[in-house]
Amino acid sequence: MEDTTHEGCPMKKRGETYRSWCDPILHHQVHEETLDDDTRLEVQTRLSRTGATQLFIGVYLADGTALYERAYARRPGETMSRALVWGVGRARRVAAERRAFSAESLGG
């Protein structure tokens, strides 16, 4: 796993999904967000070399462990901005589902 850090947060432990998707040369947009429970969201969108809108969604626990990473090779009919908005919503749902599951597991 690749470790990366951002503004004093624990390093993200990147999975194979991110490493396979990452291409810093391509134009991209990034949304990063830290939730109240320190879960970190990272959503990136970019245009591929063929002009397809692509999307990466990462949800990381407070210690940087990857909870969820998913890459979409194409988001047909979506602009980068629209894909980013959808991806942020999806990342928030993944994080909320994790919190709900954790609360159920603890009997709360």
Image (tube, rainbow, N blue to C red):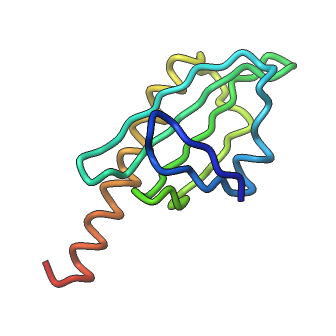
Q: Position of residue 56 (x, y in %)?
A: 62, 39
In the displayed image of the protein, which residue is found farthest to the left? 108
81 lies above or below 43: above
Placement of the N terminus among the 4 image quadrants: bottom right
Give 66 or 107, whichever is nearer the viewer: 66
Q: Position of residue 89 (x, y in %)?
A: 39, 37
51 lies above or below 91: above
Placement of the C terminus among the 4 image quadrants: bottom left
Q: Position of residue 92 (x, y in %)?
A: 36, 45
Please give the name of the residue rendered at 76% of the width and 22% of the height, measured from the top-left corner: 52
82 lies above or below 44: above
Please give the name of the residue rendered at 77% of the width and 47% of the height, measured from the top-left corner: 19
Please give the name of the residue rendered at 75% of the width and 56% of the height, measured from the top-left corner: 16
Q: Position of residue 48 (x, y in %)?
A: 80, 23
In the displayed image of the protein, which residue is found farthest to the right? 50
Please give the name of the residue rendered at 68% of the width and 40% of the height, measured from the top-left corner: 72
* Left or right relative to 46: residue 101: left
User: What count of labels does the image hold?
Assistant: 0
Query: Which quarter of the figure has residue 50?
Result: top right
* Left or right relative to 45: residue 88: left
* Left or right relative to 80: residue 74: right
